[in-house]
Image (cartoon, rainbow, N blue to C red):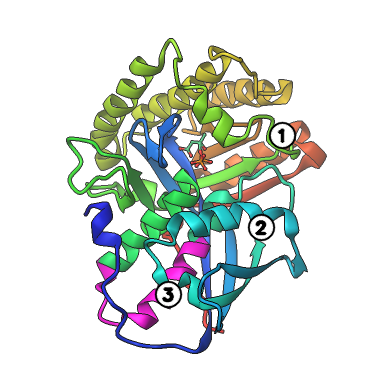
Amino acid sequence: MTEKDFLPSAYQNSLKEGKVTWKAPSNIALVKYWGKRPVQIPANPSISFTLDTCATTTSITFKEKDDKEVLSFDLLFEGRPKEDFKPKIQTFLERIETYLPFLKSYHFIIETSNSFPHSSGIASSASGMAALSMCLMDIERQLNPSMEESTFLAKASFLARLGSGSACRSIKGSLVQWGKHMHIPGSSDLYGVPYPFEVNAVFQTYCDTILLVHKGQKQVSSTVGHNLMHNHPYADNRFQQAGTNLNQLKPILASGDLEGFIKLVESEALTLHAMMMTSSPYFILMKPDTLEIINKIWQYREETKIPVCFTLDAGANVHLLYPVAAKEKVQMFIEDELAPHCENGQYIHDKVGSGAIKINS
Ligand code: DP6
């Protein structure tokens, strides 16, 4: 599908008012998206596990208004008006208005809340933009009931991407791929698709414990971060490497090759940080405790042969990935050895989920 396919035809229904609620999960990339060009086009393809527990629930109450020339909305975060989130939502709505011509016809009350603690250092933009996009698409589907399910999902992902790149991987599927790749059928720079190849059962129930090493604000915003890849001395090789890693992941995911998985996933995480350390300006986003945790994971894996590994996002927190069969042992290891390196001893047990769901109000 191209951008044009997401421009709707005239609406079949008219609607005075209503309310929709969706819950969308966060996701954790195995092959990282790092670098983009306007508007929200990734410099390389990426793939992520969809999470389950870490999620955003968003409701939109909408009511037809007289003035159909301007966008109008109120925003409540965890029950309270949240003025400082409004500019980001305003920009998002302006950006997607061409694709959702009904936006100026209604006043919206957007109510949103996260399952994870506020300021836990977990990015809520992926789950937040995904939940918001699902709500908006739900309204559009009420205006256009003949819309195919495949269009509904692709367009929700397309809109979410325009809010935050990684959000397009939080719509549907347990493993989601985003970004054109010549060997992945159906792949697109415009939206994420459920990974189309065989995935071994071991990965369908994989666990992810998020170790909250540093819960403060992100040191580098994602916009600044992605921009660091422009004129980066290693950018071209990095973008190519992501494509190659996706090729290599195919037999690993199909066969359940955990050794191959660990090598590739840890290398991707360290490469992401290596890109930040070698850009201009440069950043070190890992904390001493991040390194302590990584070393302990390596030592534990060596000693026990239990296939745990880590990945990182653009911050100090560590995602510990392991098969469900090892859950009991690994969670003891976390409690005994890793929790002391987390801020206030905090971590969140999560696992692979399947995407956004509608909540009936
Ligand atoms: C390191 O999706 O947050 O988590 O498109 O600017 O909103 P924007 O960026 P964002 O970037 C995520 C980067 C990453 C890797 C990944 O999730 O693939």
Element assignment for label 3: helix
Task: Report the amino acid beneath label 2.
Answer: Lys
Q: Is mark 1 within 8 Å of ligand 1?
A: no
**Which residue is drawn at the image coordinates 45% and 44% (left, top)?**
165
Quick one: 193 or 325, which is closer to the camera?
Answer: 193
Name the image quarter holding the C terminus.
bottom right
The answer to whether one can see residue 325 in this image is: no
Element assignment for label 1: loop
Q: Is 149 part of what is drawn in magenta?
A: yes
Numbered label attached to residue 138: 3
Task: Report the amino acid beneath label 3.
Answer: Asp
Is residue 137 rendered to the left or right of residue 336?
left
Q: Main secondary structure of the magenta part?
A: helix
Q: Residues within 10 Å of mark 3 (few under 14, many from 20)?
A: many
Q: Residue furthest right?
A: 344
Task: Report the amino acid beneath label 1.
Answer: Val
Is residue 347 rendered to the left or right of residue 276?
right
Query: Where 61 falls versus 110 (above or below)?
Result: below
What residue span does the magenta drawing correspond to? Answer: 131-150
Image quadrant assignment for residue 280: top right
**Which residue is drawn at the image coordinates 50% and 30% (left, top)?**
226
**Which residue is drawn at the image coordinates 44% and 26% (left, top)?**
268
